[in-house]
């Protein structure tokens, strides 16, 4: 498996990446912002993405988005092709783009919003902490990207204070060399359960 910084030579994979992201969102039944092949190609041209290849076959992908005039970064579109899932590839891709981001954007805070417990665990292990949406970027362009998500009405009704997604943040200025507390799967499962309960309450209104 070859995990590298994407460039123009990888644009030929943009369509299958876009289709895989859309398919994953449909199967999970949760919101993932749709990204067009053109948008993904732009990330490759700007060297703001990581791609995993098994020979010439697409295996996984993730890209960087810059918000708030460079104060914040987000890793989006993390996806692994179906035949490569369950092998730890998502964690490898996430680690690669996380390390690359810290080198390329040294002072930026890195954040993400996700519904997936597996992604929460990966983020937690890298040093992210669960935070409220108010601690994330206030860049309207970022939040407008949620419009293609099926849960967007919840986000707007709560004035962007909450949704089914959980916000997580890595701040390089406050991060210690190593976390003092080990990963606690029960805590994250409980957090996800609480958010889902609140989400269902809003959906019934």
Image: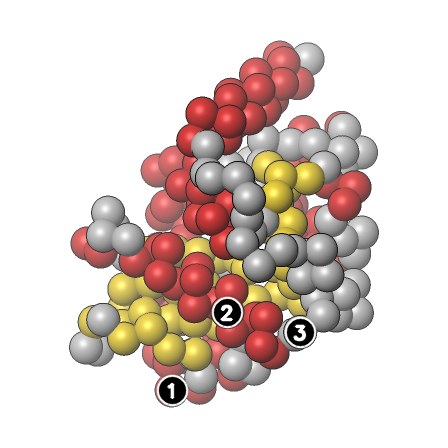
* Residue at the (40%, 41%) spot, across then down: 118
Left or right position of 187 against 146:
left
Q: Position of residue 75 (x, y in %)?
A: 55, 59
Using residue 137 as the reference point, say whether residue 170 is left or right of it: left
Q: What label sits on residue 99 in the rendered view? A: 2
Q: Which mark is residue 106?
A: 3
Q: Work out how far the residue at label 3 is from the one at label 1, CA to CA, in angstroms.
A: 26 Å
Disc with the residue nearer the chain's start (2 vs 3): 2
Residue 110, quarter of the rendered image: bottom right
Q: Quadrant of the N terminus?
A: bottom left
Mark 3, secondary structure of its residue? loop
Q: Which quadrant of the rendered structure holds the C terminus?
A: top right
Task: Tell me if residue 67 can be seen.
Answer: no
Q: Is residue 16 above or below residue 41?
A: above
> Dots 1 and 2: beta carbons under 8 Å?
no
Where is residue 26 shown, x and y percent of the image? Answer: 39, 40
Q: Is residue 166 above or below residue 62?
A: above
Question: Residue 9 shows which numbered tag?
Answer: 1
Instruction: Classify mark 1: residues with Cα within 10 Å, few (<14), some (14-19) or many (20+).
Output: few
């Amino acid at each position: 498996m070859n995990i590298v910084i994407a460039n123009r030579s990888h644009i030929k994979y943009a369509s299958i990446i876009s289709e895989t992201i859309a398919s994953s969102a449909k199967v999970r039944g949760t919101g993932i912002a749709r990204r067009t092949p053109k948008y993904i190609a732009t990330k490759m041209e700007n060297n703001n993405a990581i791609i995993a290849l098994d020979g010439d076959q697409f295996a996984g992908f993730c890209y960087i988005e810059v918000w708030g005039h460079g104060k914040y970064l987000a890793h989006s579109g993390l996806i692994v092709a179906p035949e490569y899932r369950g092998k730890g590839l998502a964690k490898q891709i996430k680690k690669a783009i996380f390390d690359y981001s810290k080198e390329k954007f040294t002072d930026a805070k890195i954040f993400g919003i996700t519904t997936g417990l597996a992604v929460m665990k990966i983020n937690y292990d890298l040093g992210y902490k669960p935070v409220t949406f108010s601690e994330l970027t206030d860049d309207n362009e970022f939040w407008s990207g949620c419009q293609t998500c099926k849960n967007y009405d919840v986000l707007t009704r709560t004035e962007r204070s909450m949704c089914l997604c959980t916000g997580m943040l890595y701040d390089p200025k406050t991060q210690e060399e190593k976390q003092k507390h080990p990963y606690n799967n029960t805590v994250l499962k409980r957090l996800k359960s609480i958010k889902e309960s609140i989400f269902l309450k809003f959906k019934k209104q």
